[in-house]
Amino acid sequence: MSEIAATTVHEAYAFACMRCGYGWEQAYEIEHHVDGSNNDFIIYKADGERVPSPLSRPTCMNCGGHVVRIMRSGRVSTVQRTLFPEESGRTEDVDAREREAAAPAAAEHHWHLSDLLHPFHRK
């Protein structure tokens, strides 16, 4: 029996593994459903595939660790653009870049925690 979602929202999150330093971003389709007993439930999908909630027990895609920092989308890609501006090749304003980073089409990016934290180090 196939159920149709009552509503679907799009969210994107940035993740950083505190064990190995791996960083990535992932966009999700979050489907809100109501079952036959009128109970709400949620289904998460990434790239069209059903996945567990990224908020309940995130798993590092690199080392399998579960000590993962979850941040708002765009954190990984914003730091990456700061560290390597020549790779972005764009002169868009910050708001446009944040909208782009939050778009579901910006599915997945991978960086290391040291890259994310580098701009915050004091000398």
Image (tube, helix red, strand yellow):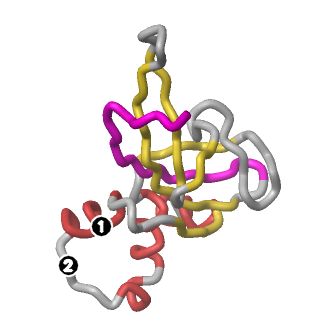
On the question of residue 64 being in view, the answer is yes
Image quarter where the N terminus lies is top right
Residue ID at (27%, 69%)? 97
On the question of residue 121 being in view, the answer is no
Left or right of 121 on screen, residue 93: left
Left or right of 8 on screen, residue 29: right
Q: Is residue 7 magenta?
A: yes
Q: Amino acid at mark 2?
A: Glu
Looking at the image, tell me whether mark 2 or mark 1 is earlier in sequence order. 2
Q: Position of residue 18 (x, y in %)?
A: 70, 48
Q: Position of residue 38 (x, y in %)?
A: 42, 10
Question: Furthest residue to the top?
Answer: 37
Establish if 1 lies above or below 120. Answer: above
Which residue is identified by label 2? 92
State the SS at label 1.
helix
Range covered by the magenta-colored residues: 1-19
Label pair 2/1, CB-CB below 8 angstroms: yes
State the SS at label 2.
loop
Which residue is identified by label 1? 100
Q: Residues within 10 Å of mark 2 (few under 14, many from 20)?
A: few
- Pick the residue in front: 123 or 58: 58
Establish if 62 lies above or below 57. Answer: below
- Pick the residue in front: 48 or 38: 38
Residue 33 placement: quadrant = top left
Q: Amino acid at mark 1?
A: Glu
Residue ID at (49%, 23%)? 41
Residue ID at (72%, 40%)? 67
Q: Position of residue 30 (x, y in %)?
A: 43, 40
Q: CA distance from mark 2 to mark 1?
A: 10 Å
Q: Residues within 10 Å of mark 1 (few under 14, many from 20)?
A: some
